[in-house]
Image (tube, rainbow, N blue to C red):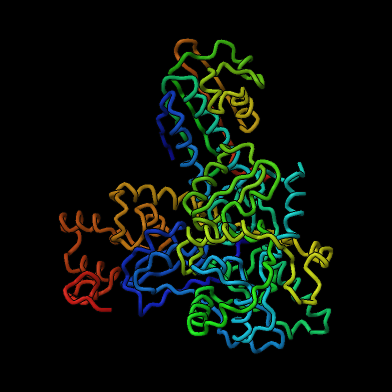
Amino acid sequence: MNFEYKVEGGDFTHAGYASSQVKKMLKQLGVDVSIIKRVVVCLYEAEVNIVAHAYSGVIYIELTADRIIMRLVDKGPGIPDIDLAMQKGYSTASHAVREMGFGAGMGLPNISSNADVFNISSDVGVGTTVEIMINLNAIAA
Amino acid sequence: MEKQFFHHALKIVEEACIGCSLCMRVCPTEALRIRDGKAHLIEDRCVDCGECFRQCPVNAIIIEQDDISHIFEYKHRVALVPALIHGQFEHDISMSEISAILKSMGFTWIYEVEHGAGVLKSVMEKLITDTQTPKPLISTYCPAVVRLIQVKFPSLIKNFAYIKAPLEMAAYYCRRVLRDMGAHNAEIGVFYVTPCAAKIAAVKSPVGEESSQISGVINLDVLFNHISKTIRNKSEYLTSEQSAVTLSPSFMLWSLTNGEAKNMKGNTLAIDGMKNVIDFLEKLEDDEITNVDFLELRACDEGCAGGVLLSSNKFLVAERLRKKAKNIINTNSRTKGDSTPPIEAYNEYLMGKVRIKEEIKPRSMYRLAEDRDQAMKMMQRSRRLMCYLPGTDCGICGAPTCLTLVEDIVRHRAHITDCIFVRHNMEEKIMLDPETSRKIMKKIWGNDNFEKNCNKKGAENESN
């Protein structure tokens, strides 16, 4: 099944819609709670990244019985140095964003540690694409 | 395996139900449907919160209770009374007056539930400061919240504090005292005066425990009526000697919102009201909430003051209780002239009883099928079906929302033609004859709703 959710840059109030929809679907499928948690953490963090940094974006969800692929494509400033952005604690979030409790520099590292497959590519001045795959069958450790 | 059967204190009286669907529309776990003009409960979804009971305009939803005569099956008859009882009356009624009335009903020992909070507090504090326990720690005080998390937020079960309610502690204490005085356990009946349906369900089928220490329940409204009648008829009860208030202020307010949270160290938060609790748990489940150590969640507004069995306005009850707590000077955990050892004397014994030992199990209401591929197929089908439904959540199909209808359809509990919009389209395309369409409508709403009836509420000759 394929789903698409649009994300508006700067709209923190409505961030999290996609993750709550996905969460409900995974519950319907009876996916292990620890895996649901990993999916939701990844998706929410990635969605907030678009809200905090980009102008707009689209979340593409591809769901099968075994795995979920989440592709988040945004139009935004892009990331000049991805390795730096992947470092824990590194953040370019504005003061205003940090005031709201976001922008601790944990987003991307958090996604990568929760995802089974994580890919990120970016064009400065164009936008960033994040791809996350999580296996839904893994037994919780 | 998830448990299949749950005891519910809420019952629908079919003869009284007019199938108005108000209950179905407020149920936070979508546990109600309309069929044959009556409300029907899907038992494994119900969390006993009592929202339906509040809404019912014809009192067709009742809360079961034990017949008061059952107390006489025991030699020692203990009444565990919640402090809330003090907030029920406009005039201050002392514990000794309430005791006198309860004794006249046949009870031999009247004890306030919240004395049992003392032993919990210290254990809870230890858990909060323990870095090993998942945070936020979620209180297991409100049974409706515990059940809600089981059905709707199973990933948060690991956050439960696994601590019994003050009620169970008070019951352990009373039983122990009576046993120490020579009574046999079988001779002791401990009856709880309950402010809500969820507490009854918790007593009858405790979550994470084999059995409760409580022998039976008396609904608070019954006691309220009894006390009201007695104090109206016998003025001497109002003038009887005033005993010292025995609960400490913080224990007296334990059942109100913030009753627990205010007494705990660390970052604590109290949330009341079913909708607020659900909204917050959604966020918590998504990892959007950080820096909370302890969460007190209550299904009712104003905590137990908003319990469905309370007769007075919840805001007044809470306010009266706060006022009373403020004026407490003399606290003592036993009644004046009482020779029984106080609850503190049994601290060590009770400490061994505080923790809920068995695992609290999930019983997800969302899961479509045990088998993943099967669930996937059902989900795909429900999403395809959703294309044909209006998304207006009108409830005319007998389900609360379009989404619940499609889920019911894939679970073989309903049919796509239950939707009046679908039927309308099918009739237009001559795929369904109007007679069949009318039959479906009557199958959902019953025949009576199609008859002229001038006795109904708001009609010409209203009478009930």
Label tally: 0
Residue B435 sits in quarter: bottom left
Quarter of the image containing the C terminus of chain A?
top right
Front residue of B348/A105: it is B348
Instruction: State the residue at coordinates (43%, 23%).
Output: A9
In the image, residue B266 above or below residue A106: below
- Tell me if residue B78 can be seen: yes
Q: Which residue occupies 51% across, 62% down?
A: B317
**Where does the image place residue B365, in percent across and percent down from the top left?**
51, 57
Tell me which residue sits at (65%, 60%) in the image: B328
Q: Where is residue B171 in the image (x, y as percent from the top left)?
A: 71, 72
> What x and y, as percent, mark residue B174?
74, 74
Residue B140, position in %: x, y?
64, 57
User: In the shown orientation, is residue B186 left or right of residue B8?
Assistant: right
Query: Does residue B87 lie above or below B213 as drawn?
Result: above
The answer to whether residue B363 is seen in the rendering is no
The quadrant of the picture occupied by the N terminus of chain A is top left
Near-viewer residue (A114 or B113): B113
The residue shown at (72%, 61%) is B356
**Foreground: B252 or A67?**
B252
* Residue B64 falls left or right of residue B296: left
Q: Nearer the viewer, residue B312 or B464?
A: B312
Apparent side of residue B227 relative to residue B381 in the rendered image (left or right)? right
Q: Image height check: is B142 above or below A101?
A: below
